[in-house]
DNA sequence: GTCTATACTTCGATAGAC
DNA sequence: GTCTATCGAAGTATAGAC
């Protein structure tokens, strides 16, 4: 009995995630969300007051859930590097369960957070704060080379959001007669995640044998 | 006499870039673009046929310009690693001149390219193709460790787009009483670019002294 | 090429009965 | 909590004079 959601608000939120991810805040249609959620539009306004209210509720929920998972990792056992491995895997796992998350995230960054109230912004801010905290501790413990925590945050998570949000456009591009010179096989997402784990370890490692310099 | 643009179409395109970056395709308003460009709305339709037409023209122009710069690097002199350094710097430079590019890119990835025609998609595809080509050659020449070119492409450019598009929301978050535990200084964009150049070299280097494993 | 005026459509939101 | 009907605002696009 795997119903999509128990009650109206949850079902609306689930559908709204799809709609906002596909079309953005301005492109999303309240009518369409209501129809796809099999609820009356007036019902939607009854629960969420406005389109903005629905959007904010959705984002606050998503950010909070992500932050909770990451905080468990940060507060848990393991080396600093292992924690970052798990952060990456956890983010990928979350996206696996909430496929609309990366697109919404991309759009919100582009938008500059204009639709978000203080509370939702705070929920969002927790994500870089937790990841940055892990990096900062690793640097302090001399497990990582000195790197601004936010730099590490962006270089490890932006590619994942980008890559997973971009699955659609990559496929669009792939079967184009262009640039057939470069291999663009649609590798599994899992491979990319492992690549990012590896790249992150390398980027933060203190000892290093020098760089490849060739022509 | 540094006028924004010589004739109507160019001035419209310049303003449209701002509008589409700030609000996205659905959120952008043709009236506002016309007003901000100091042209009559009918004039805009006269030149670009429709909102879609304007959007596509803008994106085709941007993608083409980026691709041209990158191709010069790919076809130029220098080691494979140096070329990637220059690709990163060049992308940062382009964004410096076209501040609306990263937000538009983020939105288009999220959108899946639904507003783009074949020609514009082809222009877009040239970007990963060129960068991927450099990586592929470096791998073949054993200058880089074997890595799928598209993985390298995403891990080196996604953070830059993300970081530079996110300047606004980072500032929004920065002066929030949240997560003051982590240092989130607004470092200069130049520092981040150098970080990404360094991280990219490390990620692709063949010789490596092992990873940091600490607790 | 340029402008005014407007047709046509769609969307967010609510009133009010049940 | 749920529904029907609808209002009013805002948006894209065009007709037609100059």
Image (cartoon, coloured by chain):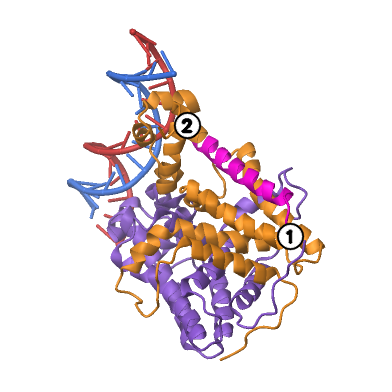
Chain colours: A purple, B orange, C blue, D red
* Residue at 75% over, 72% down: B206
Look at the picture and state if D12 lies above or below A71.
above
Q: Earlier in the sequence, mark 2 or mark 1?
A: 2
> Magenta part mainly helix, strand or loop?
helix
- Does residue B111 appear in the picture of this structure? no
Look at the picture and state if B26 lies above or below B8.
below
If the image is split into quadrants, where does the N terminus of chain B sit? Answer: top left
Secondary structure, mark 2, is: helix
**Front: mark 2 or 1:** 1
Q: What stretch is highlighted in magenta?
A: B55-80
Q: Residue C4 versus residue A37: which sits nearer the camera?
A: C4
Quarter-wise, where is residue B68 in the image?
A: top right
- Residue that mark 1 sits on: B79
If the image is split into quadrants, where does the C terminus of chain B sit? Answer: bottom right
Look at the picture and state if B24 lies above or below A113.
above
Q: In the image, C11: left or right of B191?
A: left
Residue B108 is situated, as x and y percent measured from the top left of the image, at: 53, 49
Quarter-wise, where is residue B200 in the image?
A: bottom right
Residue A11 within the segment the image draws in magenta: no
- Does residue B200 appear in the picture of this structure? yes
Residue A22 is situated, as x and y percent measured from the top left of the image, at: 50, 52
Residue A184 is situated, as x and y percent measured from the top left of the image, at: 73, 55
> How many C-alpha atoms fall within 10 Å of the one at disc 1: few (<14), some, or many (≥20)?
some
- Residue that mark 2 sits on: B10
* Residue at 71% over, 51% down: B74
Label 2 and label 1: CA atoms lie apart by: 37 Å
Q: In the image, A209: left or right of A90?
A: right
Tag 1, which chain?
B
Tag 2, which chain?
B
């Amino acid at each position: 009995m795997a119903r999509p959601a128990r009650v109206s608000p949850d079902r609306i939120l689930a559908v709204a995630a799809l709609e906002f991810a596909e079309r953005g805040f301005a492109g999303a249609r309240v009518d369409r969300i209501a129809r796809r959620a099999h609820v009356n539009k007036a019902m939607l306004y009854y629960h969420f007051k406005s389109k903005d209210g629905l959007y904010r509720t959705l984002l606050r929920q998503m950010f909070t859930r992500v932050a909770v998972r990451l905080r468990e990792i940060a507060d848990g056992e393991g080396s600093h590097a292992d924690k970052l491995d798990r952060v990456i895997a956890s983010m990928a796992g979350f996206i696996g369960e909430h496929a609309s998350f990366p697109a919404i995230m991309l759009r919100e960054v582009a938008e500059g957070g204009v639709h978000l109230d203080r509370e939702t912004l705070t929920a969002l801010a927790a994500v870089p704060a937790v990841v940055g905290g892990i990096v900062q501790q690793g640097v302090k413990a001399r497990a990582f080379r000195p790197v601004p925590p936010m730099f590490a945050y962006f270089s490890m998570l932006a590619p994942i959001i980008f890559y997973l949000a971009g699955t659609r456009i990559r496929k669009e591009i792939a079967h184009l007669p262009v640039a057939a010179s470069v291999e663009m096989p649609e590798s599994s997402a899992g491979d990319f995640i492992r690549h990012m784990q590896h790249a992150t370890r390398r980027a933060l490692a203190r000892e290093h044998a020098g760089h490849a310099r060739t022509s």
